[in-house]
Amino acid sequence: MRNERINNYQCIEARYLNETKDKAIIKVLIDKNEDFYNKFDPQKTSIDDNILDYITDEAYNIPFKYKIVIEFYSDDLSEEEKNKIKKIIRDYYIMKISNKDSIIKINLIKALFFMLFGVLMIIYSFLGGNFLGGIYQEVISVISWVLLWEGIDILALSNSSEKIEKKNFKQLYYSEIIFSDKLELKD
């Protein structure tokens, strides 16, 4: 038992995949239709944060190769209400994607600034080494390498996690959203 290898695919298959194994289904149970909306929003133009967090957390486990289907189990909803909920969810994820784009762009600018400033300081420390003296040249050299590393770190590590999150949000934005009666919910 202890040496048994855990197969991630088996967990995903059991929890999310449909019969044809081409779509991952995130099932969301809604007790009352009012629970769809954020209780602090009197116009009912935003979905409850707990629902969105649940969907986002569940989608994080699903590989990008699967199309996601978000299936809400609730009481009867009118077509107008269903379309409104779909639009609000899509708007939420498009805002998340836009936010990630902004963060990635800002990180790129910061990384380029650090790297450029680091290269300039390295050049200055080598060319101006005779004027600075030993200790100052070493301090500038260390600072320049730290700046270079910081720029590379932002590009390679920070931006890659932001890009993965953006990809998750895109996967959810393009997901199929369907509504089923609570009575149809199968375990």
Image: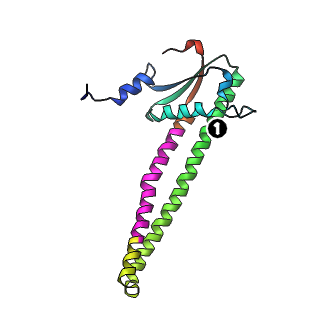
The residue shown at (54%, 15%) is: 185
- Total labels drawn: 1
Is residue 43 depicted above or below 143 in this figure? above
- Is residue 103 shown to the viewer in this render? yes
Q: Residue 136: x percent and y percent?
A: 40, 80
Q: Nearer the viewer, residue 121 or 39?
A: 39
Residue that protrudes farthest toward the top in the picture: 183
Q: Position of residue 100 (x, y in %)?
A: 55, 48
Highlighted magenta segment, given as a residue range: 143-169
Can residue 174 be seen here? no
Report helix, strand or loop for mark 1.
helix
Q: Up-down: is 75 above or below 150? A: above
Residue tagged 1 = 91
* Relative horizontal placement of residue 56, taking residue 84 as reference (left or right): left
Could you tell me what secondary structure mostly forms the magenta stretch? Answer: helix
| Snapshot quadrant of residue 139 | bottom left
178 or 27, which is in the foreground?
A: 27
Q: Quadrant of residue 105?
A: bottom right
